[in-house]
Image (cartoon, coloured by chain):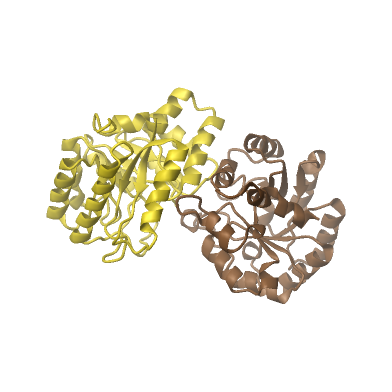
Chain colours: A brown, B yellow
Amino acid sequence: MRVDVHAWIGEYPWRALPTTGVGDLLSTMDAVGIDRAWVGSLPAAFRRDPRPDNEVLYRALAAHADRLAPAPTVHPDLPGWERDLNEAVAIGARAIRVYPCQSGIDPAGEAMHALANATAAAGLPLVLTVHFEDVRQRHPLDVAPELEASAVRALLRAVPKVQLVVAAARRPLIEEVHWGSTADESARVSWELSHLWGPPEDELARLVETVGAERFVFGTHWPLRVAEAAAAKLELLEVAPEVRALVEGENAQRLEE
Amino acid sequence: MLIDVHAHFHHDRSPRADWAALNARRLAVGERLGIRWQVGSVLGTWGRRSPTYFPSPDDVSYGNDRMLGIAAERPNRVRAYACVNPNHPAHAVDEIERCLAQGAIGVKLAASRRATDPLLDPIAELAGAHGVPILHHVWQHRRRDWPGQEASDGAELCALAARHPATRFVLAHLAGGGDWQHTARAAATTPNVFLDLAGSGADQGMVEAALAAVGPERLVWGADLTFCTAFARLRELERLGVSAEDRDAIRGGNARRIFPKGAFDAR
């Protein structure tokens, strides 16, 4: 079972993407052998109020509930954000996405603590995205900071029950959080693999060995990145089949339980 | 035939204690992926004794000797570039002559001097005279200077290429970070510039933009530092419906055309 925890549908504000819709996503999943995906709304990350985009997301995914699970966006600085979360829970969301850097709020501040506590109480993982594009290629107006390791560490410490999924992280951030946290704290964060290098540097293989296979989950970062890249990372990961199965889907399934 | 036009190797004077294992890993995974040829370079001592992008003449020569040694040890898998620092013009020219005489099949320019600078002209002319391509490090749409390198962008490399129409240039790692849309536009009208698809990026739309800008006949395949994204691009070319003939050209046919005749014959 291959589960993609980090896909979106919808347009990106800074460049045109060849494919962005639900049908495109399903075709992509078929092409690279992805069984199920947690799907967010890409435009919701960049708008003041994600609610209309979440509604579009729910409608778009409704006919494909066997493969596509919503991972809607909540902005915890908006009045009544709890209602957005409650609706997400009621509709069967698999995870909640939040983009503090794009929303202009402190990634480790009180609003984030409140949301993290609420998602923990709801039994849902909270998905954080380190960045959307490499800082070197960003549009001149795209100046939101990247999510920093210190914010991830702070959230893990401040909210004892939160389960984080951190997407698009590179090796230094992962190692800083993992080795800068207690065993209990680091056990509550999962790392999505789309931005880790395969051979010959073997970042993913090394992290699986040092940080532990149970901490990594498969994700594509589609439609910004081609899904073949994440699939290739798995394919080139030289580990025992049972270890690969953890990263490929079992860890994500455990988060869904 | 799959040819990686953008490989790197390490040696005993690089800062990495695992340099030998890293080289071995590159070769082993290359075998697994069916890479017939890896055309590699070494950038001096990779920062240990002089900066990676501003290597001293001694370090340039040492790195080239090690690269030629690796190619000599694997005459059916590895070929070498001669890497030079144009800020030392006499050494650069002598080093290219020396390395080509010892079997190098191209020139590697990193980010030591802007591509628009006249100091690069003798190097471009010499490469053209020998019929070898120049693989040139490029920062896709460089909006400012970044520490540690005097990088050039696609438009700047194309300006150099326009001054030397008889020399073939490989614009490095389109997926290596930066605005590849800018590069695709810049390269569209410069026929002696070939785009190398290497890099850790995997942006949806990049391959389509490259195909639209320069066509399959001016794309070449490479991995640079990561095989996973390079391997993914081979799959992506299939998914995009690129014909088998054009995929063959990108995988290696174009490289065979731009490197000297016989460069990939067994030695």
Q: Nearer the viewer, residue B36 or B245?
A: B36
Q: Is residue B69 above or below residue B164?
A: below
Q: Residue A250: x and y, percent?
A: 72, 51
Q: Residue at x 73, y 63 (%)?
A: A75
The structure residue drawn at horizontal position 16% and vertical position 36%, both measured from the top left corner, is B129
- Left or right: B246, with A121 as reference point: left
* Image position, residue A213 (x, y; %): 63, 57
Q: Residue at x 38, y 60 (%)?
A: B144
Relative placement, left or right, of A140 versus A113 is: left
Q: Quadrant of residue A77?
A: bottom right
Could you say which is closer to the camera, residue B64 or residue B238?
A: B64
Quadrant location, the C terminus of chain A: bottom right
Q: Position of residue A17 (x, y in %)?
A: 58, 42
Tell me which corner region of the image, top left, top right, bottom left or bottom right, holds residue B58. bottom left
Residue A34 makes an appearance in the image: yes
Residue B240 screen position, x and y as percent: 54, 31
For the residue pair A184 and A135, the one nearer the viewer reads as: A184
Residue lying at the far right in this picture: please name it: A90
Q: In this orientation, does residue B107 appear?
A: no
Q: How many marks?
A: 0
| Residue located at (30% from left, 29% from top) | B257
**Quadrant of residue A18 in the image?**
top right
Q: Quadrant of the N terminus of chain A?
A: top right
Q: Is residue A254 left or right of residue A223?
A: right
